Amino acid sequence: MAPTEHDQQPWRHHPYWQVARRDLIGTLAGAQHCELSEQRAEPGGYVPIHHHDVEEIITVLSGALMVMVDGQYFEMHAPSSVLIRPGIKHGWRNKSMSPTTFLVYFPARDPASHWREPKSKI
């Protein structure tokens, strides 16, 4: 299996949440049990409160995110990571004036997301 060239992967944009994502490792790379994506949140970009049935790891590469995990809010600055356990409600928001880049890892391909409210902001 050849390495994935990150710069060759296309960005997909979510216009409402102001977030872009590109898959680095997943189905197209031949992964059967994991997924890794790079994401970029514009100022004000967010993902609403939700949970998964598997763990999730978020690693901030540049910038900062305001993250809510299980009702607790904290600010993550690059470089830092957080482990979110299965079933724990979480979400994040870029409250800074600059874009934030981060990695998201799941030990499952295309994990199911259970949304509290698709338009709720943290």
Image (tube, rainbow, N blue to C red):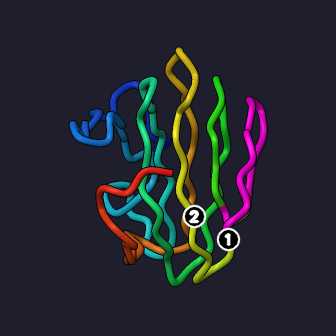
Above or below, 3 against 71 in this view is above
Other residues around mark 1 within 10 Å, as few (<14) / some (14–19) / many (≥20): some
Q: Would you say 40 lies left or right of 62 here?
A: left
Q: Would you say 40 lies left or right of 55 here?
A: left
Splitting the image into 4 quarters, where does residue 111 fall? bottom left
Secondary structure under badge 2? strand
Splitting the image into 4 quarters, where does residue 41 fall? top left
Q: Which residue is mark 2?
A: 90
Mark 1 and mark 2: span between their CA atoms? 6 Å
Q: Position of residue 2 (x, y in %)?
A: 46, 45
Residue drawn at x 46%, y 69% is 50
- Looking at this view, name the residue that lies furthest to the left: 15
Q: Position of residue 27 (x, y in %)?
A: 34, 63
Q: Are marks 1 and 2 in contact (CB under 8 Å)?
A: yes
Above or below, 9 against 7 in this view is below
Other residues around mark 2 within 10 Å, as few (<14) / some (14–19) / many (≥20): many
Report the span colored magenta: 69-82
Above or below, 110 against 73 in this view is below
Splitting the image into 4 quarters, where does residue 21 fall? top left
Relative depth, front residue between 66 and 4: 66
* Mark 1 residue type: Asp
Residue drawn at x 44%, y 66% is 31
Q: Position of residue 23 (x, y in %)?
A: 38, 47
Relative depth, front residue between 53 and 7: 53
Which mark identifies residue 86? none
Say whether residue 71 is magenta: yes
Q: Position of residue 75 (x, y in %)?
A: 73, 40
Q: Which residue is mark 1?
A: 70
* Mark 2 residue type: His
